[in-house]
Amino acid sequence: MKLATFFHGLEVHRDDRFVSLRFPIPHRVLSTCPAHGGLVDGLDMVFNHQCCEPVRHQMESLMTVYRRADLYQALVMDVYGQGTAVGAGLGTAANMRNLAMAEESHQDIAVVAIATGGVEGNAARAGDPASYYEYDGTFQKRGDIGPDSHGTINLMVAVNTPLTEGALVRAVMMATEAKTALLQELSVPSRQSSGLATGTGTDQMAIAAPACGSLPLSNAGHHAVLGELIGKAVKRALRETLERQNLLTAIRQCSCSFLLERFGLKDSDFIERVATHLPDDLAELARLNRHVLERDPLVVAAAIGLIHVHDQMGWGTIPAPCRGEAMANHGAQVAAALSGDYSRYPQYRISLAQSGFLVPDAILAYAVALGFKDKWTAFGRALDDHAGHMSNTGPA
């Protein structure tokens, strides 16, 4: 089924779990594809294929991908009726029906980005510990490092004008920067460390441009319009496909629990930590209202500040001797945001400093507990006082 037609008659087709970007004129492609990858001329298409389910699905036939990538690709193309074409393929566990397309243009330059993506189980940050050691054709597992489930961002990007070989490489860099920028904006956690993700462990990409025509463009960086268009198209397409595949949106990320995922917390762990600092009745009340408490926008805003300060200390921006004071300052902001009583900020700050908590999940849990204890106190006293006054002045 044809989904769209772009410049030069470039067509996007989807046949069940197989999405192809078909070239009506000769194109030059730079890709990470295991077969026909690298810098290649003479392709009829690049394609994206869902080869398995995202969680714990490992068919024996999938091992062909690693052992004989050329054979696996030929079989896939034959299954989907493209056996006579020459193509380069990307593989993923993402649903092809969740793909997103975005086109950006300026004067005579146009770019289209086609994205699929999942980041729930395989997101990682550049420099995180690796899962495997590859040498001399073999892969050795490194301990328990590795994702619990699949997750891959696949990008197919096409430009309507020829590019120099250097510009094709620069286009890959720009598309990668755009991907990373979006993951930062969505606060996607690495599953391999406590950092924010910059990609996944299995990301793939293909960049295509006409092989001939006008004078090739030589720059796809930040100062070139082409670079701007690539960045915008990739971010727009990737944002949409992650929303479809993972329900990942900026609004969903407005949550203390989501922001603390990268520190090892899962689902209701955060509110349980809060509950340890509360008397039984308040602890149960907090559990019953956990989504309201941890998603309060001002609480989340203060939590983001605390987490970012923690990151900056890890990067060396803030000196280590300032750690306790800085965390107490920002934790007190969290507590005051929840209680609504900013006059108690100094008391919150002292309590948090004396707690000795220095990691984000621990200090945030204590700060939320402090604020929750006081959230209704002043209001309740005011009501009690008012009720007493009314009873004393009312009719006998």
Image (cartoon, rainbow, N blue to C red):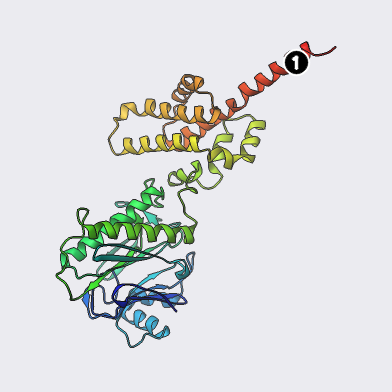
Q: Secondary structure at mark 1?
A: helix
Residue at far front of view: 107
Q: From this view, report whether residue 360 is shown above or below residue 227.
A: above
**In the foreground, 209 or 78:** 209
> Where, quadrant-wise, is the N terminus in this rendering?
bottom left
Q: What residue appears at the point 18 percent right and 68 percent down from the top-left corner?
A: 163
Q: Is residue 190 left or right of residue 29?
A: right
Q: What residue appears at the point 55 percent right and 28 percent down from the top-left corner?
A: 339
Q: Residue type at mark 1?
A: Met
Tell me residue 143's x, y (percent): 38, 56
In the rendered image, which quarter is residue 84 located in?
A: bottom left
> Where, quadrant-wise, is the C terminus in this rendering?
top right
Tell me residue 191's x, y (percent): 41, 52
Residue at the disc numbered 1: 390
Q: From this view, report whether residue 347 is shown above or below residue 189.
A: above
Q: What residue appears at the point 29 percent right and 65 percent down from the top-left corner?
A: 111
Q: Is residue 174 left or right of residue 164?
A: right
Q: From this view, report whether residue 201 is shown above or below residue 76.
A: above
Q: What residue appears at the point 25 percent right and 63 percent down from the top-left corner?
A: 107
Q: Is residue 252 left or right of residue 216?
A: right
Q: From this view, report whether residue 290 is shown above or below residue 378.
A: below
Q: Would you say residue 161 is visible in this rendering? A: yes
Q: Would you say residue 131 is visible in this rendering? A: no
Q: How many numbered marks are there?
A: 1
**In the foreground, 121 or 371:** 371
Residue at far right of view: 396
Tell me residue 23's x, y (percent): 29, 78
